[in-house]
Amino acid sequence: QVQLVESGGGLVQPGGSLRLSCVASGRFFSIGTMGWYRQPLGKQRDLVAVISSGGGTNYADSVKGRFTISRDNAKNTVYLQMTSLKPEDTAVYYCCADVDYGRRYFGQGTQVTVSS
């Protein structure tokens, strides 16, 4: 069993910053790609950013230049630094991890609200 627990969400004003964290725990041998999805209320869940075990990254066009994904392999943790936040970034953010070259696991999500 694998658990992913996100933290760091909250309410922030437009133009502000937040840093999300996600820790993976449980029984596994290796974690491959990790990343973040988001789902605005009433809309589909979309990929925001991913990072490979070697550090290669990929971002959705809507967040390029504003969000930075990173990871600490020793801590099984992935981060999402979000800057210049906009109201349209409001969503539930879910971290993900590909475990043991197989299934992609998701966390329970953390709410990010960008509003004045």
Image (cartoon, helix red, strand yellow):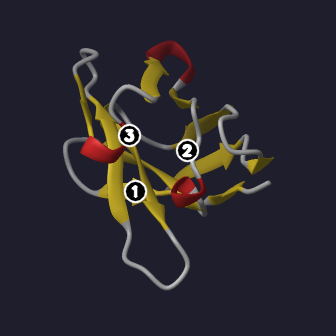
First of labels 3, 2 by sequence position: 2
- Mark 2 secondary-structure assignment: strand
Residue for point 74% across, 57% down: 115
Answer above or below: position of 39 versus 93.
Answer: below
Crowd rating for badge 3 (residues with CA inside 10 Å; few <14, some 14–19, many 20+): some
Q: Quadrant of residue 14?
A: top right
Q: For this view, does 45 lie left or right of residue 52?
A: right
Residue for point 21% across, 51% down: 102
Q: How far from the left and from the top, in percent, is residue 101?
A: 19, 42
Disc 1/disc 3 C-alpha distance (Å): 23 Å
First of labels 1, 3 by sequence position: 3
Give the number of the mark in front: 1 or 2.
Answer: 1
Give the number of the mark in front: 3 or 2.
Answer: 3
Disc 3/disc 2 C-alpha distance (Å): 31 Å
Residue 105 tag number: 1
Q: Disc 3 residue type?
A: Val
Disc 1/disc 2 C-alpha distance (Å): 12 Å
Q: Which residue is mark 2?
A: 26
Q: How far from the left and from the top, in percent, is residue 91?
A: 57, 63
Q: How far from the left and from the top, in percent, is residue 12?
A: 77, 45
The residue closer to the viewer here, 16 or 95, is 16
First of labels 1, 2 by sequence position: 2
Residue 83 tag number: none
Q: Disc 2 residue type?
A: Gly
Q: Which residue is mark 3?
A: 63
